[in-house]
Image (tube, helix red, strand yellow):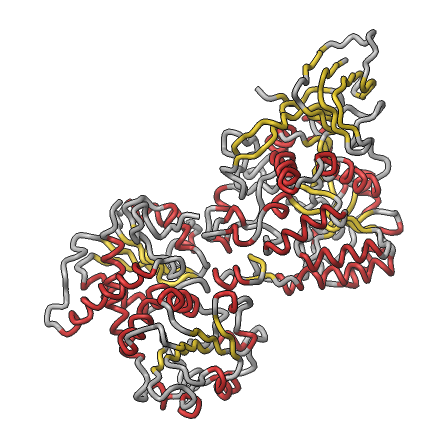
Amino acid sequence: MHNPQLNRHGELTHLLSTEGLPKDILTHILDTAQTFVPLAEREVKKVPLLRGKSVFNLFFENSTRTRTTFEIAAKRLSADVFNLNINASSTSKGESLLDTISNLTAMQADIFVVRHEASGAPYLIAQHVEPHIHVVNAGDGRHAHPTQGLLDMYTIRHFKKDFSNLTVAIVGDILHSRVARSDIHALTTLGAAEIRAIAPLTLLPGGLEQMGVRVFTNMEQGLKDVDVIIMLRLQNERMKGALLPSSQEYFKHYGLTREKLAYAKPDAIVMHPGPMNRGVEIDSAVADGDQAVILNQVNFGIAVRMAVMSIVAGASQ
Amino acid sequence: MKILIKNGRLLDPKNGIDQICDISIASGRVVGIGKVDPSFEAKRVIDAQGLAVVPGLIDLSVRLREPGFEHRATLESEMHASLAGGVTSLVIPPDTDPVLDEPGLVEMLKHRAKQLNQANLYPLGAMTLGLKGEIITEMAELTEAGCVAFSQAVRPLIDYGVLYRTMLYAKTFDYTLWLHPFDAALSKGGVAASGAFASRTGLAGVPVQAETIALHVLFELQKSTGVRLHLCRVSSAAGLDLVRKAKAEGLPVSCDVSINQIHLIDQDIGFFDSNYRLDPPLRSQRDRDAIRQGLADGTIDAICSDHTPVDDDGKLLPFSEAEQGATGVELLFSLVYKWALETKIPVLDALAKITTQPASILLSGAPALPPCGHLDIGVPADLALVDLDAAWVVNRESIYSQSCHTPFFGYELPAKVKMTLVGGRVVWESA
């Protein structure tokens, strides 16, 4: 099956998932991001790589944080940025997803940054846009959030240099998490030694073992000697539908406290895609502690998104 | 009109016939097979040299989308498609709009079909009013109007009390219930089979227990009521084990699967191709293998197309938002033949799954229907001529159905129907 993310030259033309991307493409994105990181320190933070190009942020699902980082990234690349909160406008009027896309294409879009509540929606868009348009998935359902996955990889590489000896634990609502899936695929491709998932059984999807993941339901065992801990956000609505009884009970067993963190390696880093629920999945003492690299992630996230947009925009048609 | 079909290779699973012979037809019926009386003066002689002559196919699930969904398909378009696929008898699920829950609607549908004067159309009546799962329909009245059995289609029936009493009422008149085994609560929101594929792609899963629990419930209630059940689109290895056990215990159960289920698995969904959005969802390779095993050992009696035309608006959507269903009636023969070739099943055994066996399922609950699914002297001349050596590609040009949304779009398939007769009339022939 042809990977719709790559063009016929094998270049990245859309970023839809970290799954199925060759290691050299992942590494190229991280290396490119590395060149953009120092920009944040400069007085003039812009480079002209996307000058004259139009980036449309199409957010069918609400998000302030991700949309803002994409907006900053696009502006630093000198692109014109348009934010569309589609939830509020066209779908409520009955316009179909592809109609929306055709309309925006007619407005001379070059890159669509798409967030949608349905898994796979950016694939549908990528399959129907004209070949000069690039689609970047900013989160689709439970499926993928590849720029988050890549910025997590950037962060891990920054602090740990090499993946091959690392044990990485992903903790929390794996079932509903596109971040977890994107991290798992990227870590696998980049050669992490061991990937663990830690959660109560109600928040673990079946078949994780077939993705090469070791599954734990106990934090003490799961965190033992890990190098990296990726905490996931627990949405409040998980208390409905018999997935969890209460956030208090969840915090008691799965919240990352200093005591639990002590099971990991002493130099383990703690990551979180944000926004955090302090006192639900993570204790403030850990979130604000020395081992947390959560704010670094935010900074790297802008560089990674700049890298992704500049790379797909440079793919030949 | 008197018709003589010469030199065809007659394939009749019921009589175990696979031989070259002539068939003569008069007054809508088969009057001679083998050596035809030389005094027979045919108005039309059809040279079937190199073609197979098969009983008209019986498709146990064809949605014609009428009434209610004429923008997706009409009786004309889909009956034409059926005939192009060699299907001469169609069973229609009741989930039209309005649903087939009152005699007037059924009579109107039968009347429309009769005017078109093409395939035999056998509606399933809704077993509960509006398919709401609350009130039993007038089954006897619906039967008089032309319903051949009763079904809840793919709508949930949550109240087991209603299910139990519906079974008792159906048993009173010896009607068959056609049921899709799925537990509504466990299926809710699911769009793909639970498992590694759904987990990886982030599609909401339907656990296999949605099927096995429903089957346990049905069999327990069946043991008490004695009602005859036909199980539609059983999808899992575990489910088929339960059906096998029920049959071994002697429960009056039959079972079908769709052409999609005998060929495809969840991995084939690939990059969220909404043409693979089907109900029930495609399961794993292991389940597909069990389905093929179940066909071989007789646990599964019949294969249907589960023809469900969906228009572009319903399919050009993200996978989980797309409507379920696929066009298929024109692919029935080819896909069954493809399965036979792949698994080296004898052609007559494969053909039985779309002729003799669906006929006996149909007739067991509606014995007054005219005979179908086999070619004997005296039976209505419903048959198809098929070029088994032909190959064709599924695309907009080759498909008559108003919708060409099928997972097999672009596939090259073996065997092409060349001509179809219903009641001794040539109702379709290829250009």
Q: Quadrant of residue A141?
A: bottom left
Side (left or right) of B171 relative to B153: right
Residue B364, given in percent of the width and then of the height, sits at 84, 42
Q: Quadrant of residue B214?
A: bottom right
Residue at screen point 68% across, 47% down: B257
Q: Is residue A243 left or right of residue A35?
A: right
Pick the front one: A91 or B304: B304
Residue B348: x and y, percent? 74, 34
Is residue B396 at all visible to an observer of this figure? Answer: yes
Residue at image point 71% right, 12% down: B45
> Where's the C terminus of chain A, which quadrant?
top left
Instruction: Indicate the position of residue A258 as horizontal and vertical percent values.
Output: 40, 91
Looking at this view, is B292 or A280 the one in front?
A: B292
Is residue B117 visible to the viewer in this orientation of the structure?
A: no
Could you say which is closer to the camera, residue A22 or residue A269?
A22
Image coordinates for residue B133, horizontal then vertical, percent: 72, 57
| Residue at image coords 70%, 38% | B59
Outermost residue, left direction?
Answer: A43
